[in-house]
């Protein structure tokens, strides 16, 4: 009997059992966000773990972990398109929302804290009538896996999250993320590129933005209108596999006190498949604070959730 001939329920149970055994036999953990430090979920409340739906696949959040995500409205998560495209769920196209869930307000993935919320729909980018639009079906996706262009997707949740979302940097807040500014990425990414084993605890790492010219020299598929890049500080720290979809957020001052603004969504860090490979190269992010993507996200989320997800009046902190 082949694997595909085994009933789906038994395949899921076997996969969960093997994942549990692998965790028990694995050696002591090393940082997932390379060189990162553990933080409480309250320090980055917008951090979301995307996972295979627990009701369908079993196992705890760590065993089912898929990618990172960023809560930008109570019912909307922003993530990387490649996290929900051509997953094991479907050979082509984008994952069906019902097969994944968003884990919100949970700093330790294997725990039961926070919320595990189902996904109603996955929204990806297409071009319609000369304009960009987020859709749930139809059209030719703009996401280009080879070049990681338009690597961004929106997930509509089945219920509101209790966690505090993050706002995108607004049109008059460009000074908060100019080249040289440092932001943070918080994620549960894999310990090492060759081992599909996420961190159980939320880890954070500081990353400094590079100028567009520097990014273009070090990234073969650079497209400045929709991408921004940053390097870990100090060198040797940064994002790696499994961190995709997590947000790069910069600290700001607002009228209500200290806060963060979302600038980018983690796309990739060129890896040499060695532990130092990811941290040695800049990470490329979808430039969601750029006019091209920010306006579109703002308009789409206003229609989905009835809230404005773009900030205003913030100053660098």
Image (cartoon, grey):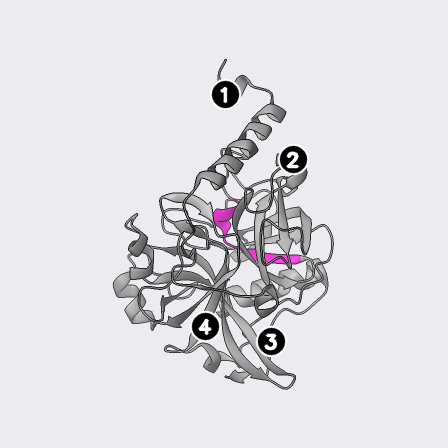
**Residue 13 falls in image quadrant:** top right
Contact between labelled residues 3 and 2, with CB atoms less than 8 Å apart: no
**Residue where numbered disc 3 is placed:** 311
Q: Which residue is mark 2?
A: 56
Which of the 4 image quarters holds residue 77? bottom right
Badge 3 or badge 4: first in the primary sequence: 4
Name the N-terminal-most of marks 3 and 1. Answer: 1
Label 2 – label 3 distance at C-alpha: 37 Å
The nearer-to-camera label among 2 and 3 is 2
Label 4 and label 2: CA atoms lie apart by 36 Å
**Along the polypeptide, which appears first: circle 2 or circle 1?**
1
| Above-or-below relation of 206 to 87 | below
Q: Are the residues flagged by discs 2 and 1 in contact, CB closer than 8 Å? A: no
**Upstream in sequence: badge 4 or badge 2:** 2
Please tell me how crowded label 4 is: few (under 14), some (14-19), or many (20+) other residues with Cα within 10 Å.
many
The residue identified by callout 4 is 183
Secondary structure beneath dot 3 equals loop
Label 3: how many Cα within 10 Å (few below 14, some 14–19, many 20+)? some
* Range covered by the magenta-colored residues: 76-84
Q: Kindly identify which residue carries mark 1.
A: 3
Q: Which of marks 3 and 2 precedes in the sequence?
A: 2
Are there few (<14), some (14-19), or many (20+) residues within 10 Å of tag 1? Answer: few
Tell me the mark number nearer the camera, choosing from 3 and 4. 4
């Amino acid at each position: 009997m082949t694997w595909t001939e085994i009933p789906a329920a038994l395949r899921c149970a076997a996969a969960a059992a093997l994942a549990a055994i692998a965790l028990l036999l694995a050696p002591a953990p090393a940082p997932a966000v390379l060189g990162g430090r553990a933080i409480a979920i309250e320090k980055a409340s917008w951090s979301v773990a995307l996972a295979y739906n627990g009701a369908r696949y079993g196992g705890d959040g760590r065993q089912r972990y898929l990618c990172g995500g960023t809560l930008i409205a109570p019912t909307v998560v922003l993530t990387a398109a490649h996290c929900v495209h051509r997953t094991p769920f479907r050979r082509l196209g984008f994952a069906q929302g019902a097969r994944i869930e968003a884990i919100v307000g949970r700093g330790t993935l294997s725990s039961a804290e926070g919320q595990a919320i189902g996904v109603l729909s996955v929204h990806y980018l297409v071009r319609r009538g000369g304009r960009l639009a987020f859709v749930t079906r139809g059209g030719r996706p703009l996401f280009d896996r080879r070049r990681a262009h338009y690597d961004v997707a929106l997930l509509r949740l089945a219920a509101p999250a209790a966690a505090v979302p993050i706002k995108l940097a607004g049109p008059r807040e460009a000074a908060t993320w100019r080249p040289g500014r440092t932001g943070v990425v918080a994620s549960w990414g894999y310990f090492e590129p060759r081992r599909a084993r996420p961190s159980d605890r939320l880890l954070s790492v500081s990353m400094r933005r590079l100028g567009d010219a520097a990014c273009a020299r070090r990234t073969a598929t650079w497209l400045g209108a929709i991408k921004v890049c940053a390097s870990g500080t100090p060198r040797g720290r940064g994002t790696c596999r499994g961190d995709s979809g997590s947000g790069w957020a910069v600290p700001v001052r607002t009228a209500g006190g200290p806060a963060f603004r979302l600038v980018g969504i983690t796309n990739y860090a060129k890896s040499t498949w060695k532990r130092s490979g990811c941290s040695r190269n800049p990470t490329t992010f979808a430039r969601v604070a750029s006019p091209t993507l920010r306006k579109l996200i703002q308009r789409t989320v206003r229609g989905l959730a009835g809230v404005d997800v773009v900030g205003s009046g913030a100053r660098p902190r």
